[in-house]
Image (tube, rainbow, N blue to C red):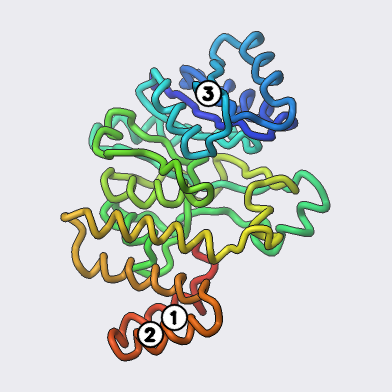
C-alpha cells in the first residue's frame, strides 16, 4: 500500500482546515497529514491542535521562530518533516474527493512514474465569493486537456505546444525520492505564484503522468479571503507578481545548462512581455522601441503574450 504524506500549509483557515484534514483522512493510503501553521491571525492554530488530539495521523508543526514565512517556506517545512514514500499537497481551504488517489494507486506501480497530476473543481463558499470569482473560475475543471507524455508537460506549461491546460498542486502526487533531482523546492521569497514556479521546475526534472483529467479529484474552495483575492481586488497588481514569477523562471533557465536555447528564448520573451506590461507608460514605450531595434522577434512574441495569454496563470 502507498504511504502518502499530505502537506497542508495553514494560514487564516480556521473555518476550513477541519474539512481539509477529514477529506484526506478518508484514504487508507494517507500515512500522515502534516499541518504547518504559519502564524495565522485567526484561531487556526487552536483548531490544528484539536485535530492532532482527535486524529493520530495528524501532525502539527510551526516554523522554528513561530513566525509567518509564506506558503513556499511552509510547504518546504512540510516536505522536510514528511516520512511517507509519496508527497501530496492540499491547501487548507480546499478538500479531496473520494477518487483522489484512484489513478495514483495504479500508476505508481510503475517505478518510472515520478509524479501524477489530475483535475480539480471549484466550490464557492459564499454568494459574494461567487460574484467576485465566477468570471475567473466559472464552474470549469482546472485540468490538462488531453493526455500528454511526460516530456511534453514542461513545454506544455510554458504554452509551447498548443493549449495544454493547467493542473494544481492539490491534484499532484510525487514520489518523494524523486525530489532529490531538485536542488530546492518552493522559492521562499515568492509570496505569490510560488506553486506555479515549482511546477515548472518539477515538470522539467521529473516524469509526470496524467491521472484523472475528465473529472475533479479535489475541490478548490473559493472565499473572500483567498490569497488570490488581493490580486483580483487590485490590492496587489497582477502583472507585478507575474514579473517576479517570470524573472525567477528566467534566472533558473539561464543557469540550467540542459535546457535547450529555444526554450530559454521563449522564457525570456515571456519575461520581457510582463516587464513591459508592468512598466510605467513612458518607460514601457521606451522598452518597446529598444526591443524593436534590437530584437524584433522577441518584442513581437512578447506583445502577443501580453495581449492573448493573460489567462495562463
Using a 10 Å C-alpha cutoff, classify the residue at mark 1 as few (fewer than 14 neighbours), some (14 to 19) or many (20 or more). Answer: some
Looking at the image, is 216 positioned above or below residue 99? below
Q: Residue 300 carries which label?
A: 2
**Quadrant of the image containing the N terminus:** top left
Do the numbered discs 1 and 2 sit on residues whose CB atoms are within 8 Å? yes
Q: Which residue in the structure is indicated by mark 3?
A: 65
Question: Is residue 253 visible from the viewing direction of this image?
Answer: yes
Residue drawn at 30 percent across, 29 percent down = 109
Kindly indicate the quadrant of the structure image that contains residue 250. bottom left
- Report how far apart the C-alphas of labels 2 and 3 lie in the structure: 48 Å
For image coordinates 67% across by 60% down, the residue present is: 232
Residue 104 position in % (x across, y down): 41, 34
For the residue labelled by badge 2, is the local secondary structure a helix, a strand or a loop? helix
Give the side of residue 270 with respect to residue 282, left or right: left
Q: Nearer the viewer, residue 60 or 86?
A: 60
- Which one is nearer the viewer's eye here, 181 or 255? 255
Secondary structure of the residue carrying numbered label 3: loop
Residue under label 1, please give it. Answer: 304
| Residue 21 x/y as whole percent | 61, 25
Distance between mark 1 and mark 2 Cα atoms: 6 Å
Q: In this view, does 228 lie above or below 14?
A: below
Amino acid at each position: 500500500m502507498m504511504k502518502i504524506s499530505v502537506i497542508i500549509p495553514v494560514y487564516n483557515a480556521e473555518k476550513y482546515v477541519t474539512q481539509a484534514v477529514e477529506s484526506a483522512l478518508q484514504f487508507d493510503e494517507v500515512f500522515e497529514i502534516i499541518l504547518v501553521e504559519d502564524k495565522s491571525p485567526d484561531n487556526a492554530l487552536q483548531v490544528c491542535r484539536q485535530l492532532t488530539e482527535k486524529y493520530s495521523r495528524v501532525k502539527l508543526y510551526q516554523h522554528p521562530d513561530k513566525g509567518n514565512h509564506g506558503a513556499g517556506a511552509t510547504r518546504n517545512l512540510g516536505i522536510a518533516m514528511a516520512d511517507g514514500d509519496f508527497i501530496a499537497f492540499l491547501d487548507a481551504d480546499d478538500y479531496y474527493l473520494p477518487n483522489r488517489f484512484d489513478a495514483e494507486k495504479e500508476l505508481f506501480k510503475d517505478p518510472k512514474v515520478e509524479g501524477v497530476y489530475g483535475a480539480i473543481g471549484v466550490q464557492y463558499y459564499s454568494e459574494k465569493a461567487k460574484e467576485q470569482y465566477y468570471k475567473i473560475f466559472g464552474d470549469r475543471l482546472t485540468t490538462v486537456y488531453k493526455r500528454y507524455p511526460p516530456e511534453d508537460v514542461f513545454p506544455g506549461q510554458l504554452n509551447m505546444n498548443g493549449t495544454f491546460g493547467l493542473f494544481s498542486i492539490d491534484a499532484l502526487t510525487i514520489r518523494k525520492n524523486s525530489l532529490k533531482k531538485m536542488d530546492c523546492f518552493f522559492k521562499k521569497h515568492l509570496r505569490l505564484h510560488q506553486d506555479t514556479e515549482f511546477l515548472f521546475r518539477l515538470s522539467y526534472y521529473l516524469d509526470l503522468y496524467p491521472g484523472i483529467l475528465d473529472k475533479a479529484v479535489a475541490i478548490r474552495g473559493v472565499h473572500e479571503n483567498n490569497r488570490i483575492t488581493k490580486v483580483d481586488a487590485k490590492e496587489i497588481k497582477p502583472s507585478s507578481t507575474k514579473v517576479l514569477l517570470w524573472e525567477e523562471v528566467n534566472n533558473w533557465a539561464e543557469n540550467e545548462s540542459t535546457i535547450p536555447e529555444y526554450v530559454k528564448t521563449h522564457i525570456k520573451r515571456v519575461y520581457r512581455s510582463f516587464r513591459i506590461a508592468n512598466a510605467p507608460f513612458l518607460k514601457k514605450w521606451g522598452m518597446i522601441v529598444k526591443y524593436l531595434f534590437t530584437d524584433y522577434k522577441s518584442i513581437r512574441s512578447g506583445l502577443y503574450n501580453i495581449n492573448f495569454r493573460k489567462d495562463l496563470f
